Image: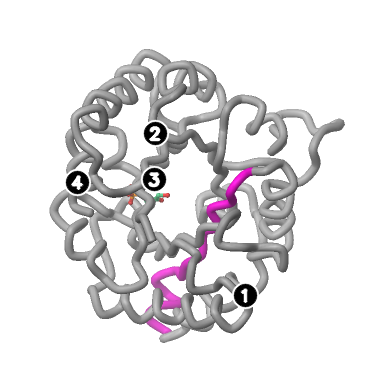
Amino acid sequence: MRPLIVGNWKMNTMRSEATALVAGLMEQRAELDPGCDLLVCPPFVILRPVADIIEGSPIALGAQDCHTDNSGAHTGDVSAGMLADAGCEFVIVGHSERRADHREDDVLVVSKAGAAHASGLQAIICVGETLDQRNAEETLSVVEGHLLSSVPDGATAENTVVAYEPIWAIGTGLTPTIEQISEVHDHIRALLVARFADGNEFRLLYGGSMNPGNAREILAVKNVNGGLVGGASLNVKDFWSICASV
Ligand code: 13P
């Protein structure tokens, strides 16, 4: 399957920075197909300016969150339908920063993923353990719990991507060992295969301090089908270097 490299810009980039960043990626992509699909996930208010630039290019657009409902009295929220209307093909749901900052739980996340599917978006569903859970050897059970409860029954390889992001690896410069990444990704694959007819086809991303120095090794792991990149996605050179590592 073709790997997917995702830039999660989080709450970063003013419009001018965002447009320069994506224009730089367009230039690189015009010269070379790195052998993977490329997706950028800017903040909501930057989606349209970025959509205008990447229109017709092989770079796809995604958002970082959506509401469970398609419209209504939800001040400050944005629906999956609106994201599709703004040019998005993907939406990240259940990121650990949303789970922590906004007290999102699996019940909410599974509903957001369902809303994404109903609007024709691919949901990138995030799972992952805290450092305490890792130290208590609970990683596989935590990830299993997230996976069973956050991935809706209607998920298919066409509408769902699963991202494993150990919370302690996000923005810290720390990463699990290759063996640890491999163990979790194999476990996720086995759970998907047990539950879904096309479980073998789902793309599984690794996220957490991925950078040009470690990407090649991580992306070579069996059952790692791409990356969800935070900090390093804000720099054209670094992000492109990760893409080229595929
Ligand atoms: P960093 O790459 O900055 O560690 O962030 C990872 C992440 O949370 C992507 O969603």
Where disc 1 sits, the SS reads loop
Q: In the rendered structure, which disc, 3 or 4, sits on the residue that comes first in sequence?
A: 3
What residue type is disc 2 on?
Ile
What residue type is disc 4 on?
Ala
Alpha carbon separation for disc pair 3 and 4 = 13 Å
Alpha carbon separation for disc pair 4 and 2 = 14 Å
Where disc 3 sits, the SS reads strand
Alpha carbon separation for disc pair 4 and 1 = 31 Å
The residue beneath circle 4 is: 244
Give the residues in magenta. 121-136
Q: In the rendered structure, which disc, 4 or 1, sits on the residue that comes first in sequence?
A: 1
Estimate the x, y position of residue 72 in percent, counting from the top left: 86, 32
Do tag 3 and tag 2 residues touch (Cβ < 8 Å)?
no
The residue beneath circle 2 is: 59
Residue at point 35%, 44% (across, down) = 230
Do tag 3 and tag 1 residues touch (Cβ < 8 Å)?
no
Q: In the rendered structure, which disc, 3 or 2, sits on the residue that comes first in sequence?
A: 3
Q: Residues within 10 Å of mark 1 (few under 14, many from 20)?
A: some
Q: Residues within 10 Å of mark 4 (few under 14, many from 20)?
A: some
| Residue 106 showing in the rendered view | no
Q: Residues within 10 Å of mark 3 (few under 14, many from 20)?
A: many
Relative to 197, residue 162 above or below: above
The residue beneath circle 1 is: 196
Q: In the rendered structure, which disc, 4 or 2, sits on the residue that comes first in sequence?
A: 2
